[in-house]
Amino acid sequence: MDWIYSTADPLIQTLIGSAIIFVVIIVLTRIIGLRAFAKFTAHDFAFTVAIGSIISSTLTSNTSLVHGSFAIACLLLITFSFSFLQRKFSLLNNIISNSPLLLMDGSTILDVNLKSARIAEEQLISKLREANVLNFEQVFAVVLETTGDISVLHASDGYKNERFDKKLLSGVRKKP
């Protein structure tokens, strides 16, 4: 029965620790900025996973709240430093960040790019449906973003009569 519930479980400590860690994360995020939890790059993803792991170990193991809070603060500082260095040094940004990839150019599906990104045509079409695309002729571009999200740039009901600013595709790779 101990595997379901044990009277030795520190439930009150976990409750209080959860509240403290919650406040610590809010305070540190306010100091560092919202960019800390953005999902722009691989290191942003790694940071988010690491924060979750620290929170988990702080609340469910013998890691002290001070130790867990300090680890979270260190990760936030590292993330802040990386984002600053990425803005300052484009080479570092190119090494750390993926660049977006064009999956559709107008109504043309770029099969080579889909294959390179390991995205099935059915998945692409699903994203078009999610974006309420009614006709391939509505599509200006579909982009696999650095976050792994897929952006669909399309005209509304007026189809191609709307103006499309090509600057929206700056930095997007046309080939894998």
Image (cartoon, rainbow, N blue to C red):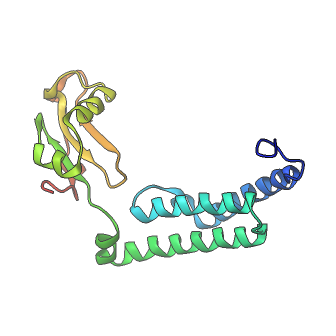
Which of these two is toward me, 157 or 128?
A: 128
Q: Is residue 73 visible?
A: yes
Q: Is residue 63 left or right of residue 132?
A: right
Residue in the picture at 67% in, 57% down: 56
Which of these two is toward me, 4 or 109?
A: 4
Q: Is residue 43 left or right of residue 11?
A: left
Residue in the picture at 58% in, 69% down: 76
Residue in the picture at 88% in, 51% down: 12
Tell me the quarter of the image containing the N terminus.
Answer: top right
Q: Is residue 36 visible?
A: no
Counting from the top left corner in percent of width and height, residue 131 is at 31, 30
Q: Is residue 15 above or below residue 126?
A: below
Counting from the top left corner in percent of width and height, residue 77 is at 57, 74
Q: Is residue 120 above or below residue 55?
A: above
- Count all numbered tags in the image, as a single digit: 0
Which of these two is toward me, 148 or 82?
A: 148
Counting from the top left corner in percent of width and height, residue 107 is at 12, 33
Q: Is residue 50 above or below residue 160?
A: below
Residue in the picture at 90% in, 48% down: 7
Counting from the top left corner in percent of width and height, residue 105 is at 13, 42
Tell me the quarter of the image containing the C terminus.
Answer: bottom left
Which of these two is toward me, 51 or 172?
A: 51
Q: Residue furthest front?
A: 1
Q: Is residue 70 left or right of residue 82?
A: right
